[in-house]
Structure formats: structure tokens, C-alpha cells
Image: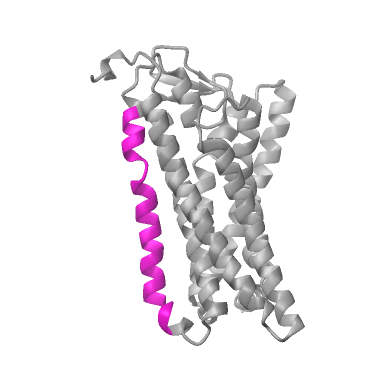
């Protein structure tokens, strides 16, 4: 039955982090700094890879796409959250709420597809070094990246459409800083176990299949690294894999807590903290872990800085 006519809610209230006005201003300043640092760090990676032709390799193309994705991802939530810190009403329209829901989940899903691709690239580079240039060519890499983006944006339109057809007749207060399926399903006037189950199954399949693919790739990488005769080579490979796995563990661990069962009864405060971890903290630290610690990336940054200074002096 089409229940769209029952919808009397035209806007939602995102409570975000309810606290005193002074604390709200402090949070606004804190998250503004974090937001700017995230944009600068990830934007620097995108610019460096684009400008330095020496690092136009699959590894850095993947890193640049990942950083661009992080910029898009954080822009689905943080600007609205910052606005709500200084707003008295904290409202978001029905349409804007579900658009945020769609783009937030599409970006997150795209990230779960890009991370396995990056792990597979490292597996080929370390375990199949002689065949790596022919297998992971730049055209194939670009096609795989495009496939990740397209697939990520095609996963959730149908579930989101069915959630929009649920009757929302009040209350309209979401105790979160983002339009998330758990709080939205809780506001529906009727229970929707079928939609909740389908969202849980879809999220579980995406999360677990990609997570175990990453785990398998890095297991093979670590096995290969153990046979590297050079101690320095082993340390470098272990450091790289350990950093990547740290980000993967943080991202996937929080996803599993939140979305394997969207209405599993997690307290609202826990939901906000967990969502902050994978939507704001990981985009902030990823440039440091994935790229800015990388020798080639730092050399490319220095080269661009020198070229900029020379052009300015002229």
C-alpha cells in the first residue's frame, strides 16, 4: 500500500549534540578546524597526484581517488552539523534529510569498495611484482575506480525509496547529527521489520564481503613479506600494511557496530560517537596514514612547493 499520503512530517529536527550555548560554540570551532584540516590534507594529495606525473601510477591514482572521496564524504555531514551548532531550530527538510541519507551511504559504500581495490593493488605489487605492470595497468585501474563509484551509488536507492514511503506522522526529532536509518525507522508510525531486515542484510553483505577480501589480501601480503630477505624491506612493508589495516579496522569496526542491525538499541550517544569516528575522524587521519608519511608523496609535495616559490619570485 502506498502510504506517501500519510506523511505529515515535512521536516526533521537534528538534535546533534544538545548542550549549552557556550559548548555548542566550542564544538563548532573544534569541528571547523577538523573539517578544514581534512579538506587541506586530502586536497593536497589530490593536487599532488594530479600535478606530479612521476607518481601517475595505480597506487597513487587510487590514493587520489580515495582522498577525493573523503572530501565528498565529509561534506555530506559536517557542513550541516556546523550549521546546527549555531542554529536555534536545527531543522532539515524531509527531502534534504533523505538526500543526505542517500549521499552519506553512497559515499560510505564507495569507500568500502575502494579499500579492497587498494588492498588488491598492494597484493599484486608485493606478491606478483613481475606481472604487476601488465595486470594493473592505468586504464584498468581507472575502470575499476569508476566501477567502485557507480556501484556505490546504486546500492541504496531502492531501500531509501521504501523508507520514504513509510508514514512519518510525528514526532520528528532525530537524536543524531545525520539522517541515519536507525533513528529514521524509529520515527515511523508503523514498524517496518522487512525494511530493517533488508537494510541489515544489504549492509552485512557489503561490509563482510569487502572486509574479508581486504583481510585475505593482506594475509597473502604479510606471508610474502616474511620471505623478504632484507630486514629494512620487511619493516617498510609491515609498516605500510599495519597502517592500512589500522584504518580498515577503525572504519569497518565502527560500520559493523552501526549498520549490521540499524535499530539494535545502541544508545544515541554511542551512535553519535561511532558515526563521528568513521565519518569525520578517519577522513582526518587517512592523509597521514596513507600518503603524507609516504616518501614519494612528501618528495612530490616539496617539488610542488619549490615550483610555486620559483614562479612567485619570477
The image position of residue 99, as x and y in percent, is 39, 35
Considering only vertical position in the picture, is 64 above or below 189? below
Question: Residue drawn at (74%, 25%), measured in percent from left and top?
Answer: 22
Question: Residue drawn at (51%, 37%), measured in percent from left and top?
Answer: 259
Report if residue 153 lies within the magenta region: yes
Question: Residue drawn at (57%, 48%), measured in percent from left and top?
Answer: 252
User: Which of the 4 quarters of the picture holds residue 292?
Assistant: bottom right
Query: How many marks can you see?
Result: 0
Q: Quadrant of the N terminus?
A: top left
Considering only vertical position in the picture, is 207 above or below 292? above
- Whether residue 72 is visible, yes or no, is no
User: Which of the 4 quarters of the picture holds residue 294?
Assistant: bottom right
Report if residue 252 lies within the magenta region: no
Q: Nearer the viewer, residue 139 or 74?
A: 139
Question: Residue drawn at (71%, 78%), measured in percent from left and top?
Answer: 234
User: Which of the 4 quarters of the picture holds residue 48?
Assistant: bottom right
Which residues make up the magenta segment? Answer: 134-162
Q: Quadrant of the C terminus?
A: bottom right
Q: Nearer the viewer, residue 204 or 273?
A: 204
Amino acid at each position: 500500500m502506498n502510504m506517501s499520503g500519510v506523511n505529515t512530517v515535512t521536516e526533521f529536527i537534528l538534535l546533534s549534540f544538545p548542550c549549552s550555548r557556550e559548548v555548542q560554540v566550542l564544538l563548532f570551532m573544534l569541528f571547523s578546524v577538523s573539517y578544514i584540516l581534512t579538506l587541506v590534507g586530502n586536497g593536497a594529495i589530490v593536487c599532488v597526484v594530479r600535478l606530479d606525473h612521476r607518481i601517475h601510477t595505480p597506487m597513487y591514482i587510487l590514493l587520489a581517488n580515495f582522498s577525493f572521496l573523503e572530501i565528498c564524504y565529509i561534506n555530506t555531514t559536517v557542513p550541516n552539523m556546523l550549521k546546527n551548532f549555531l542554529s536555534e531550530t536545527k531543522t532539515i527538510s524531509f527531502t534534504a534529510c533523505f538526500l543526505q541519507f542517500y549521499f552519506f551511504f553512497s559515499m560510505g559504500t564507495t569507500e568500502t569498495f575502494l579499500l579492497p581495490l587498494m588492498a588488491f593493488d598492494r597484493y599484486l605489487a608485493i606478491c606478483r611484482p613481475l606481472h604487476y605492470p601488465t595486470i594493473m595497468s592505468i586504464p584498468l585501474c581507472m575502470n575499476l575506480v569508476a566501477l567502485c563509484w557507480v556501484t556505490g551509488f546504486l546500492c541504496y536507492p531502492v531501500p531509501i525509496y521504501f523508507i520514504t514511503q513509510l508514514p512519518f506522522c510525528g514526532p520528528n526529532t532525530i537524536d543524531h547529527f545525520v539522517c541515519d536509518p536507525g533513528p529514521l525507522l524509529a520515527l515511523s508510525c508503523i514498524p517496518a521489520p522487512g525494511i530493517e531486515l533488508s537494510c541489515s542484510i544489504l549492509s552485512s553483505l557489503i561490509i563482510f564481503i569487502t572486509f574479508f577480501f581486504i583481510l585475505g589480501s593482506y594475509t597473502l601480503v604479510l606471508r610474502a613479506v616474511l620471505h623478504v630477505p632484507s630486514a629494512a624491506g620487511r619493516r617498510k612493508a609491515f609498516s605500510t600494511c599495519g597502517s592500512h589495516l589500522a584504518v580498515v579496522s577503525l572504519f569497518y569496526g565502527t560500520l559493523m557496530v552501526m549498520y549490521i542491525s540499524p535499530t539494535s538499541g545502541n544508545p544515541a550517544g554511542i551512535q553519535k560517537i561511532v558515526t563521528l569516528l568513521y565519518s569525520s575522524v578517519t577522513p582526518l587521519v587517512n592523509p597521514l596514514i596513507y600518503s603524507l608519511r609516504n616518501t614519494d608523496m612528501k618528495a612530490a609535495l616539496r617539488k610542488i612547493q619549490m615550483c610555486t616559490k620559483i614562479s612567485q619570485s619570477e
